[in-house]
Image (cartoon, coloured by chain):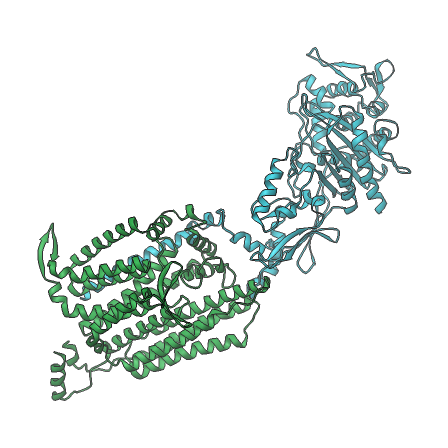
């Protein structure tokens, strides 16, 4: 009988080995796959199980975790959800996270390496980690002014502190309510998400930093900068500004927005050409400078570079190899030139900052759960786009735009505002977008702002009419605070 | 049985100190685990935990002292292993209690009664029965005298849940009886009684069952009239499956009977016949009973039924995957997400927190226990003892394989308890009784015969043994 018992024990040993192999397959080999499967609540529960750090604007938590009575211990709540949605993003059971909730996840959930000391304590004590706090660079007053200005419109506003690159405001319209996407009710989340997805106005799109539009006449700042830095032109240089500009190699003509010539005898100074946003003069200037010079200038302002704020911004583009008529169109911000509101704010800020482009950033500092500062962002120079004298000249030209030119709606009593309007067609028979970029005070700017309003009227004045008042409100919000 | 008469000349080591040392180590592991859970849950090491640890240690010590007195040559490994397994079970039940309590606090609902105390009570009862078996059953061969009585009792217990009024259906399976507030799973007791019956019956009948009648394509077939017992065992198993809807118990009894039949008769043909009958039964059950069919379809692709029939197994796999190599750490996983985490799925709950490393150790603990049992069987001096020890070890082996294989998706899921770990008194008590009987058999086989027996005594023994 012993032999039979030994044979049976061999069989049982094989069965145990099969069990062990199967457990290894589940827990080691396929574990990653199982963790990512739909319906696996564990990863999320692990996240919802600990207190997630807040996202702060100043000292005010705009996103914070509150304790609930459910399986999901913590709920993410947003104060002023629509106002800060393009910054915080959402933190959803079903759709994951976006915005700072996504990029700063490891800080907010306390798993980043900078919490190493904390983590050792957690390891010893077995405590759940608590998240760190992320303080943004956002200025609540500027953010609110921009948000109110865009109410009822479709568009975006970005405001930057020129000297540092700190993003003071980043607003989109329409916006969405991250509370509804971060709730614990899957049905509500799905319903709301589907509604947002179906909305033709795309409220989930982070317009300020990812929406690419032709910058239109605001791009004339780049062309003007290229002209000044070429050494061949100064604000008083007289250039041709006829009623129409015949696009080389074609039988098409480019007209000025007011269908008139820009100066007596079709001649105009560079300063006046910018002030009245003369298309023909800048088209001529484009071909005079050549596409390479304009592209180089644009790249010094941040075009063709992808920025991470840490939110990933779309890369603004100047066409790679335009022919002459395309270069003419590109010089006035049409053809294939595409820019985000962030990019145009950077151009404006650089001009105000004596020609120095700063790397934009959205996070001021990271704090540990006990509020000690772990990390502070230092301003970083991106490039020197203009010499200070050239920047000063361009600034004066922009002040002239507001005081005597197309940008009169941005005037602020006792403050010298430098600005530029723009209107662009996004395509044939497609709606136009209105732009306004500005910084103030002109001598030592505290804020540079770019306003984008979509579906605007066809006239150049729409930049002044729709976008400039918003820029003015944002500038006032910043200046009044100081 | 001639072994009884040859008196060994040198004294055999009892190895009781080894047992005590292993027991202290097992207790230490359990204590550390409890401390960690207390720590993680923020409860700390409360007096309650120390008292619990003290009670568990006291019970294990009582078992150890009993062995020293009444079965001092018994195997020294089995008690520490069984104790450690029981402690791991208590640990996990306590851990899930903590999770439920925390949830109740957060949702403002009344605190649930912790199950760990009732399991601790059952552990006390188990140890009392363990001691009683060792004290009262000085010689396991006495059990052979009651072969048919015990067999009948086992059969009655097996069908008891079907009696209206006392049988209760839990989660679709009718395997509980309820008397007043006490509920009891009679199949747990039945598995011991029927193993004793099988052993006694097969020892008596194995010669006739081993007779070869015909050869059919190379297989030696038993006589047709000897097929009776196998067919009866098969029909009873099918009845359990059909009427009590208890897939696991049905499989356990049939597998146990076939394995013991093979050991007793030393004929492979019984395994082949048993296997064929199993296949016929499985096919019949698959096509005739929806509950069997759904188990199989879920087993084949649990992901397709992740929200319905496959929910349990999918949650179990999620838990295990979350554990990974080293586990989430005691108190830091989400074992309460797996349904029946304290009972059927306790291995999944453990696997999430102690990882694949911990589960390997766990499966090895079972393997050691089963191996010691089978070793006891091989070493036993009498055929009845051999068959009984083998049968009891096989009960453990089948149960461990079927339940761990089931919750990990290796085989279709059946509702068997995990020996020593699962929350539930009947199972814990029954498994401790199994350990007691195995220890008794091992003690008998290793115990030296009385030193220098007088020729008279030797003669009497021979007469008695014949």
* Residue that lies at the very extreme toward the top in this rendered image: A251
Q: Is residue B376 visible?
A: no
Q: Is residue A438 above or below residue B246?
A: above
Residue closer to the observer: A55 or A193: A193
The percent coordinates of residue B266 (x first, y second) are 16, 62
Report the number of discs: 0
Chain A visual colour: cyan
Left or right side of B311 for B444: left
Q: Is residue A87 above or below residue A21?
A: above
Q: Residue at left 22%, top 76%?
A: B143
Left or right side of B199 for B31: right
Q: Is residue A460 visible?
A: yes
The percent coordinates of residue B147 (x first, y second) are 20, 73
Quick one: quadrant of the N terminus of chain B? bottom left
* Residue that lies at the very extreme toward the front in this rendered image: B164
Quick one: quadrant of the C terminus of chain B? bottom left
Q: Is residue B272 above or below residue A468?
A: below
Chain B visual colour: green
Residue closer to the observer: A307 or A100: A100
Left or right side of B378 for A408: right
The percent coordinates of residue B438 (x first, y second) are 28, 73
Give the quadrant of residue A460: top right
Give the quadrant of residue A7: bottom left
Left or right side of A312 for B144: left
Residue closer to the observer: A455 or B284: B284
Q: Residue at left 66%, top 52%?
A: A77
The percent coordinates of residue B417 (x first, y second) are 37, 64
């Amino acid at each position: 009988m012993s032999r039979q018992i030994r044979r049976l024990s061999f069989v049982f040993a094989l069965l145990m080995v099969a069990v062990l192999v199967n457990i290894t397959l589940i827990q080691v080999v396929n574990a990653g796959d199982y963790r990512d499967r739909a319906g696996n609540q564990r990863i999320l529960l692990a996240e919802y199980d600990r207190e997630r750090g807040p996202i702060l604007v100043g000292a005010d938590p705009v996103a914070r975790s509150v304790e609930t009575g459910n399986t999901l211990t913590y709920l993410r709540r947003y104060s002023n959800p629509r106002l800060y949605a393009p910054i915080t993003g959402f933190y959803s059971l079903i759709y994951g996270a976006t915005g700072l909730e996504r990029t700063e996840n490891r800080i907010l959930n306390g798993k980043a390496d900078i919490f190493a000391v904390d983590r050792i304590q957690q390891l010893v004590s077995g405590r759940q980690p608590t998240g760190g706090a992320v303080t943004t660079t956002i200025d609540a007053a500027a953010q609110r002014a921009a948000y109110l200005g865009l109410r009822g419109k479709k568009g975006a506003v970005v405001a930057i502190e020129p000297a540092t690159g700190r993003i003071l405001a980043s607003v989109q319209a329409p916006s969405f309510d991250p509370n509804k996407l971060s709730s614990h009710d899957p049905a509500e989340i799905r319903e709301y998400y589907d509604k947002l997805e179906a909305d033709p106005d795309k409220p989930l799109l982070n317009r300020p930093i990812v929406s690419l539009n032709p910058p239109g006449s605001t791009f004339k700042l780049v062309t003007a900068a290229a002209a000044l830095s070429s050494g061949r032109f100064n604000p008083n240089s007289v250039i041709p500004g006829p009623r129409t500009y015949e696009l080389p190699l074609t039988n098409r003509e480019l007209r000025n927005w007011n269908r008139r010539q820009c100066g007596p005898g079709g001649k105009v100074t560079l300063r006046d050409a910018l002030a009245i946003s003369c298309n023909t003069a800048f088209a001529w200037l484009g071909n005079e400078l050549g596409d390479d010079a304009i592209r180089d200038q644009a790249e010094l302002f941040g075009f063709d570079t992808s920025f991470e704020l840490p939110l990933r911004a779309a890369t603004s583009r100047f066409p790679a190899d335009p022919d002459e008529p395309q270069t003419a169109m590109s010089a006035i911000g049409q053809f294939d030139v595409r820019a985000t509101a962030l990019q145009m704010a950077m151009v404006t800020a650089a001009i105000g900052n004596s020609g120095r482009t700063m790397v934009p950033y959205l996070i001021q500092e990271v704090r540990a759960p006990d509020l000690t500062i772990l990390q502070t962002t230092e301003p970083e120079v991106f490039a020197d786009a203009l010499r200070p004298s050239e920047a000063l000249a361009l600034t004066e030209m922009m002040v002239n735009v507001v005081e005597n030119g197309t940008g009169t709606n941005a005037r602020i009593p006792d403050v010298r505002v430098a600005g530029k309007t723009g209107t662009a067609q996004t395509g044939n028979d497609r709606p136009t977008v209105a732009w306004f970029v500005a910084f103030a005070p002109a001598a030592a700017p505290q804020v540079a702002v770019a306003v984008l309003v979509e579906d605007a009227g066809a006239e150049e004045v729409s930049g002044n009419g729709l976008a400039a008042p918003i820029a003015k409100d944002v500038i006032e919000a910043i200046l009044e605070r100081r | 049985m001639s072994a009884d008469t040859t008196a060994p000349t040198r004294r055999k080591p009892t190895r009781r100190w080894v047992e005590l040392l292993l027991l202290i180590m097992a207790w230490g592991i359990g204590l550390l685990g409890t401390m960690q859970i207390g720590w993680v849950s923020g409860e700390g090491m409360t007096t309650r935990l120390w008292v619990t640890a003290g009670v568990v240690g006291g019970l294990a010590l009582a078992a150890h002292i009993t062995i020293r007195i009444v079965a001092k040559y018994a195997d020294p490994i089995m008690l520490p292993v069984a104790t450690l397994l029981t402690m791991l079970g208590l640990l996990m039940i306590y851990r899930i209690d903590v999770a439920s309590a925390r949830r109740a606090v957060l949702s403002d609902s009344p605190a649930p009664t912790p199950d760990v105390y009732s399991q601790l009570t059952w552990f006390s009862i188990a140890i009392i029965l363990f001691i009683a078996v060792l004290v009262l059953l000085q010689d396991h061969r006495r059990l052979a005298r009651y072969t048919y009585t015990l067999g009948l009792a086992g059969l009655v217990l097996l069908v008891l849940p079907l009696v209206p009024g006392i049988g209760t259906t839990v989660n679709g399976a009718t395997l509980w009886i309820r008397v007043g507030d006490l509920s009891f799973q009679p199949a747990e007791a039945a598995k011991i009684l029927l193993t004793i019956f099988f052993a006694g019956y097969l020892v008596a009948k194995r010669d006739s069952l081993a007779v070869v009648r015909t050869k059919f394509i190379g297989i030696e077939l038993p006589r047709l009239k000897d097929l009776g017992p196998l067919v009866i065992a098969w029909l009873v198993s099918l009845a359990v499956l059909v009427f009590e809807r208890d897939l696991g118990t049905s499989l356990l009894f049939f597998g146990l009977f076939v394995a013991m039949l093979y050991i007793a008769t030393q004929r492979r043909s019984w395994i082949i016949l048993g296997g064929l009958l199993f296949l016929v039964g499985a096919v019949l059950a698959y096509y005739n009973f929806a509950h069997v069919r759904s188990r199989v379809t879920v087993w084949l692709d649990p992901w397709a039924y992740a929200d319905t029939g496959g929910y349990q197994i999918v949650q179990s796999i999620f838990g295990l995957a979350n554990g990974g190599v080293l586990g989430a750490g005691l108190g830091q996983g989400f074992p309460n997400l797996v349904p029946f985490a304290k009972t059927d799925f306790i291995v999944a709950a453990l696997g999430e927190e102690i990882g694949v490393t911990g589960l390997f150790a766990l499966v090895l603990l079972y393997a050691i226990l089963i191996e010691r049992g089978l070793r006891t069987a091989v070493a036993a001096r009498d055929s009845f003892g051999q068959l009984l020890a083998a049968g009891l070890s096989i009960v453990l082996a089948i149960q461990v394989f079927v339940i761990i294989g089931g919750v990990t998706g290796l085989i279709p899921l059946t509702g068997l308890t995990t020996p020593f770990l699962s929350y539930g008194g009947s199972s814990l008590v029954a498994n401790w009784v199994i350990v007691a009987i195995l220890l008794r058999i091992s003690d008998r086989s290793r115990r030296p015969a009385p030193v220098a027996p007088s020729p008279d005594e030797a003669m009497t023994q021979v007469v008695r043994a014949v």
